[in-house]
Image: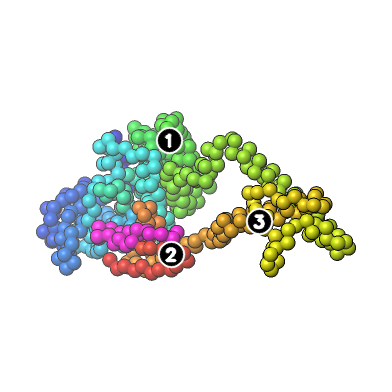
């Protein structure tokens, strides 16, 4: 994969004569060169005060005065822009300064490779991996946009991938730099990289956060398709494509791409800003929904049981219901007959009572054996038989009631809460699933049970805690890196 066109700015400091690297700069001891780009050289260095390795980006200042001033302003603008931010997907700035020969920025030392190198090496990500990675970048852009910053140069070489493929956004040197006025094609000056510019940026129009969203869409397109959306042979040809050409839809190039992800790319790359996601948070949320939805759904056991139930089971339930209905009707009829019999006993000599053998001792309730037939009465056989049947039915019902366990109403467990106090910040994961960054995240709502909470801050050792959540319980978790 070829290198994308670099930003067409009126200066390129790396073309200046580069003096030999210093042994020290500021308080840092230079170790070795680890990278080189259009804006300078990056060295590994040692911070003797905090005893940690850092990366130092150095730009030589050996230029005539007019360009030196512009270089210093842009470079130190990057330090101020990124230095005021604390986000797990934005490189952390430790220090910045300048000498007579150099301007420098000290930042966290990263291990891995940038996304451009990753793709140029023939590596591919799955659609879900691509969405998960770009979800983190979109969250970083949202964080910067909320602070009034528009990055303006989001491209694969400015996204650094750690060894576990977690991204770090680099290079805020062009963020909110003054935009030049629109000029005729061929003389205008551009800030950014044409292959990933938004149409309004390519046209020299005013920019807002939606320009960064377009750039994010072009990178996601490249991850899914294996090629750039806009890749002309010259800068002008590439800019023309950005302004008027619609690249092939992702699903035409990669038919196996999930439709929701195709729609996300299409919306992010709308030529008109009004047709895009209006905030990077909206793009982040859409990607998060896709990542969550692409996991294998849990199977509802109750639904499965009902779906696999044999057809005869419904007939059995109908027969059981019919039997219960018949018993209920007979019980009601018996109750009426018993009431009539009681009224007749009040008016006539009790013929039925004379037919039942008298007990030898104190009278006891009449007991009719469940398994044996009732005794034949001497008179009113119909009424007596009905009463005996009713008593037998009552006895059987009572036996069933005693045998059936009393089922208490099931009270569903309530979710618990974990309050978070993390300093200076931490990337929160619960049971292996990212949940956001604290701060601003201050609490987690978790279902009852045991959960593993992991908190990460850059290259610092992660903090891992196992918590047991009880119904409605609130726990506190705090950690300082």
Which label sits in the foreground, 2 or 3?
Answer: 3
**Residue at coordinates 86% horizontally, 60% vertically from top-left?**
344
Residue sitting nearer the eye, 222 or 132: 132
**Residue at coordinates 72% horizontally, 46% vertically from top-left?**
326
Q: Which residues are magenta?
A: 441-466
Specify few, some or many for label 3: CA neighbours under 10 Å numbering under 14, 14-19, or 20 or more.
some
Residue 85 visible in image? no
Q: Position of residue 457 (x, y in %)?
A: 29, 60
User: For mark 1, what is the residue?
Assistant: 257
Which label sits in the foreground, 1 or 2?
Answer: 2
Main SS of the magenta segment?
strand
**Mark positioned earlier in the residue sequence (2 or 3):** 3
Horizontally, is 252 left or right of 370 in the view?
left
Residue sitting nearer the eye, 397 or 442: 397
Specify few, some or many for label 2: CA neighbours under 10 Å numbering under 14, 14-19, or 20 or more.
some
User: For mark 3, what is the residue?
Assistant: 395
Q: Which quadrant would residue 406 be assigned to in this image? A: bottom right
**Residue at coordinates 28% horizontally, 66% vertically from top-left?**
481
* Cβ–Cβ under 8 Å for marks 3 and 1: no
CA distance separating discs 1 and 2: 41 Å
**Residue at coordinates 35% horizontally, 59% vertically from top-left?**
453
User: For mark 2, what is the residue?
Assistant: 470
Residue 434 visible in image? yes
Residue sitting nearer the eye, 257 or 406: 406
Q: Position of residue 451 (x, y in %)?
A: 37, 58
CA distance separating discs 2 and 3: 45 Å
User: Does residue 190 show up magenta in the picture?
Assistant: no
**Mark positioned earlier in the residue sequence (1 or 2):** 1
């Amino acid at each position: 994969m070829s290198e994308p066109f670099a930003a067409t700015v009126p200066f390129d400091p790396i073309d200046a004569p580069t003096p030999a690297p210093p042994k020290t700069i500021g308080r840092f001891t230079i170790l070795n060169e680890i990278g080189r780009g259009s804006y300078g050289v990056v060295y590994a260095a040692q911070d003797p005060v905090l005893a940690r390795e850092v990366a130092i980006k150095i730009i030589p200042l050996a230029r005539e005065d007019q360009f030196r001033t512009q270089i210093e302003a842009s470079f130190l603008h990057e330090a101020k822009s990124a230095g005021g931010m604390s986000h797990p997907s934005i490189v952390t700035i430790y220090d910045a300064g300048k000498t007579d020969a150099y301007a420098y920025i000290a930042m966290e030392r990263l291990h891995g490779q940038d996304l451009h190198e990753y793709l140029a090496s023939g590596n591919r990500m799955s659609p879900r991996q691509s969405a998960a990675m770009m979800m983190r970048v979109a969250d970083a852009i949202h964080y910067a946009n909320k602070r009034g910053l528009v990055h303006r140069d989001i491209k694969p070489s400015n996204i650094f991938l750690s060894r576990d493929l977690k991204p770090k956004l680099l290079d805020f040197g062009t963020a909110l730099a003054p935009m030049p006025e629109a000029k005729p094609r061929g003389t205008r000056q551009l800030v950014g990289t044409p292959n990933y510019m938004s149409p309004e940026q390519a046209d020299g129009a005013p920019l807002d956060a939606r320009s960064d969203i377009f750039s994010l869409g072009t990178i996601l397109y490249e991850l899914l398709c294996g090629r750039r959306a806009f890749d002309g042979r010259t800068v002008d040809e590439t800019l023309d494509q950005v302004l008027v050409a619609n690249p092939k839809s992702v699903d035409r190039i990669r038919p196996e791409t999930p439709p929701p992800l195709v729609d996300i790319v299409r919306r992010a790359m709308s030529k008109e800003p009004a047709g895009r996601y209006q905030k990077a948070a909206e793009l982040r949320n859409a990607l998060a929904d896709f990542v969550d939805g692409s996991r294998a759904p849990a199977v509802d056991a109750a639904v499965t049981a009902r779906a696999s139930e044999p057809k005869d089971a419904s007939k059995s339930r109908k027969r059981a219901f019919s039997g219960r209905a018949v018993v209920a009707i007979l019980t009601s009829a018996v109750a009426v007959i018993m009431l009539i019999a009681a009224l007749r006993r009040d008016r006539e000599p009790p013929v039925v009572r004379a037919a039942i053998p008298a007990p030898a001792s104190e009278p006891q309730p009449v007991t009719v054996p469940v398994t044996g037939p009732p005794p034949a009465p001497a008179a009113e056989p119909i009424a007596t038989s009905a009463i005996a049947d009713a008593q037998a039915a009552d006895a059987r019902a009572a036996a069933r009631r005693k045998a059936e366990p009393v089922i208490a109403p099931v009270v569903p467990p309530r979710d618990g809460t974990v309050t978070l106090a993390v300093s200076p910040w931490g990337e929160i994961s619960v049971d292996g699933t990212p949940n956001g960054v604290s701060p601003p995240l201050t609490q987690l709502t978790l279902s009852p049970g045991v959960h593993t909470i992991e908190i990460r801050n850059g290259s610092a050792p992660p903090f891992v805690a196992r918590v047991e959540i009880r119904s409605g319980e609130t726990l506190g978790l705090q950690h300082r890196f």
